[in-house]
C-alpha cells in the first residue's frame, strides 16, 4: 500500500484556541507558544493499493486547487479517486467534497462514520442549531445530495475497504460526535492519521488534558487524546494529524 501525507495549507493558529484551565495547563501552553503562534499545516492522506485510491479528508472548498495539484503529482485526477473517507464534518475536512453543490470527485464513494453522519443529518437538531453549527448540517446535506447513494457509513474498528483489510477507523469521538482517525496496520508497522485529536501539537501532546475551543465535548476529547497518545508512545506508532507542525509521520518521544 502506498500512503502519502499531503499538506494543503500552511496555517498558524493562535494559542488562545486552547482551553487551559489549571495553572499547570496554562504554564504548558505558555511554554510551548511564547508568542502565542501555533505553527500548523493542514494535512490529508492519499492511500493507494489493491484498486483503491482513497483520500482521507479533502481540505477546504478553497484548497481544492492544492488537492488537484497533489493528485496530479501522483499522476491522478479527480476521476481516479475511488473513495473519500471523512474523519468528521468540519469545513476544513469536508469542504473539498463539493463545489457549487456538485461532487468534486465524480466516481468516489464517500465514507462517513455512522455516528458522524447521524449527528449532522438529524432534522430536529439542524433546526435548533446555532449559526456556527448550522453550516455543518448544510455542508453534509450538500454532500448527501451531490453523492447520493455513494454516501456510505462505517463503524470504527472494522475495515474501511474490503480490498485493504489493514485500514480501519479509530473511534475518536469528542472533537465531534463521530470523529475518527484512520489506522493502517502493515506487518509490524502501525500508522495513525489522528485527524483532529489535537490542534496544538507541542502543548497538547505534553498536556493532553487541554482541549481546544473546537472540541464539541472537551472532556471526551481529552480522554481519547490521552489514551491514544499513550498507546502511540508505548507501541511506537508512526503518527501524523490534520493540524500538526509537520507532514512526515513520526514516532512520539
Ligand atoms: Zn475539526
Image (cartoon, rainbow, N blue to C red):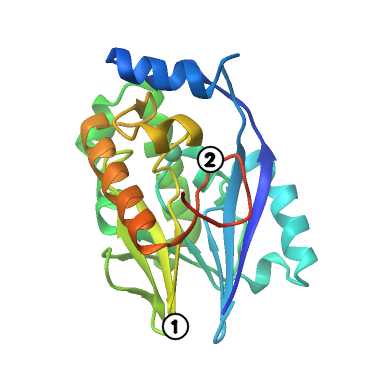
Disc 1 target residue: 187
- Residue at left offset 32%, top offset 60%: 170
What is the CA distance from the residue labelled 1 to the residue labelled 2? 27 Å
What percent of the width, then of the height, locates residue 69?
78, 56
What percent of the width, then of the height, locates residue 111?
41, 63
Does residue 29 appear left or right of residue 81 in this picture?
left
Q: Is mark 2 within 8 Å of ligand 1?
A: yes
> SS class of the residue under badge 1?
loop
Q: In the rendered image, is residue 204 in sight?
A: yes
48 lies above or below 137: below
**Residue 210 location, quadrant:** top left
- Residue at left offset 44%, top offset 68%: 150
- Residue at left offset 24%, top offset 32%: 217
Does residue 39 appear left or right of residue 15 in this picture?
right
Disc 2 target residue: 243
In the foreground, 135 or 41: 41
50 lies above or below 123: below
The quarter of the rendering in which ligand 1 is drawn is top left
What percent of the width, then of the height, locates residue 70?
74, 59
In the foreground, 200 or 9: 200
> SS class of the residue under badge 2?
loop
Point out the frontmost of discs 1 and 2. 1
Q: How many marks?
A: 2
What percent of the width, then of the height, locates residue 129?
29, 26
Q: In the rendered image, is residue 179 in sight?
A: no
31 lies above or below 236: above
Amino acid at each position: 500500500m502506498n500512503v502519502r501525507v499531503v499538506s494543503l495549507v500552511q496555517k498558524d493558529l493562535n494559542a488562545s484556541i486552547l482551553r487551559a484551565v489549571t495553572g499547570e495547563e496554562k504554564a504548558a501552553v505558555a511554554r510551548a507558544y511564547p508568542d502565542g503562534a501555533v505553527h500548523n499545516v493542514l494535512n490529508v492522506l492519499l492511500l493507494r493499493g489493491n484498486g483503491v485510491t482513497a483520500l482521507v479528508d479533502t481540505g477546504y472548498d478553497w484548497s481544492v486547487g492544492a488537492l488537484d495539484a497533489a493528485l496530479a503529482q501522483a499522476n491522478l485526477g479527480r476521476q481516479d479517486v475511488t473513495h473519500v473517507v471523512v474523519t468528521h464534518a468540519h469545513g476544513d475536512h469536508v469542504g473539498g467534497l463539493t463545489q457549487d453543490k456538485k461532487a468534486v470527485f465524480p466516481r468516489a464513494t464517500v465514507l462517513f462514520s455512522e455516528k458522524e453522519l447521524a449527528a449532522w443529518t438529524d432534522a430536529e437538531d439542524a433546526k435548533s442549531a446555532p449559526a456556527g453549527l448550522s453550516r455543518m448540517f448544510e455542508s453534509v446535506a450538500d454532500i448527501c445530495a451531490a453523492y447520493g447513494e455513494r454516501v456510505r457509513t462505517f463503524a470504527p474498528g472494522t475495515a474501511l475497504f474490503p480490498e485493504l483489510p489493514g485500514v480501519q477507523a479509530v473511534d475518536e469521538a469528542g472533537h465531534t460526535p463521530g470523529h475518527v482517525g484512520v489506522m493502517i496496520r502493515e506487518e509490524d508497522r502501525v500508522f495513525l492519521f489522528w485527524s483532529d485529536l489535537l490542534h496544538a501539537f507541542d502543548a497538547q501532546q505534553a498536556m493532553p488534558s487541554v482541549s481546544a475551543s473546537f472540541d464539541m465535548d472537551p472532556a471526551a476529547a481529552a480522554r481519547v487524546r490521552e489514551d491514544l497518545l499513550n498507546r502511540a508512545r508505548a507501541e511506537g506508532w508512526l503518527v501524523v494529524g490534520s493540524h500538526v507542525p509537520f507532514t512526515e509521520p513520526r514516532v512520539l518521544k
